[in-house]
Image: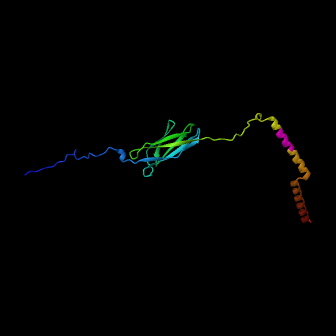
Amino acid sequence: MFFSISSVCASQNTTDSVSDDVNSSKMNTHIVSGDITGEEGDSVYFSVDILDENENPVMNGSATLSLNGKNYESKVFNGTASFGDIEIKKGMKQGIIYYHGNEYYNDSTQTVDIYLVEESYKDIPIYDDDLDIDVSKQTENHAQRQIGAVKAIDDSRATGNPIALALLGLFVITSNLIFKRKR
């Protein structure tokens, strides 16, 4: 009689196929952003949405906005990273947004364009004092205004003042009505 007993060693019962690939269980992410726009010297506010591969908001983590060697940090809350006090400087063209990921989400990056708004104003001369104004033109304009005023006075004397005539007419009508009542 021959008996056979099998035994299993604990070290042999382990799975050799366990993978240390942590990224296989993490979800991929992507960043949705617009452009940064502002005038030179402005301090602007900018926010981005960070979504997972199912288009759901990433619930937490941190993000960095890198512009011309300066980094702006933000916590991600309900899929939104907000960056404040971004200084707009001449020469800025692009920046990079980094989502740093965590135990649930993979890292992601996005390039953002920066548009510098330059206001253009029409060339309107502004005179701060009377020295900038040509004195001969100023005297000529003053003389033309005086001639126009004198002409208007002469015209009103020739035709009569229509307002004064209307008031006089109302006065006469009112007076007649008052006198008729008293009789």
Across and down, in percent, residue 83 comes to: 51, 42
- Kindly identify the residue that appears in the image at 88 percent across and 47 percent down: 153
Across and down, in percent, residue 51 comes to: 45, 49
In the current view of this chain or complex, which residue is farthest to the top? Answer: 131
Give the prevailing secondary structure in the magenta stretch.
helix
Front-most of 161 and 42? 42
- Would residue 11 appear left or right of 135 to someone viewing this image? left
Task: Give the position of the C terminus as an image quadrant.
Answer: bottom right
- Would residue 9 appear left or right of 44 to someone viewing this image? left
The residue segment tinted magenta is 140-147
- Would residue 18 appear left or right of 38 to someone viewing this image? left
Across and down, in percent, residue 154 comes to: 90, 48
Would you identify the image quadrant in which residue 61 lies? top left
**What is the basis of the colouring in this image?**
rainbow
Query: Residue 144 lies in magenta, yes or no?
Result: yes
- Kindly identify the residue that appears in the image at 89 percent across and 63 percent down: 177
Across and down, in percent, residue 77 comes to: 46, 47
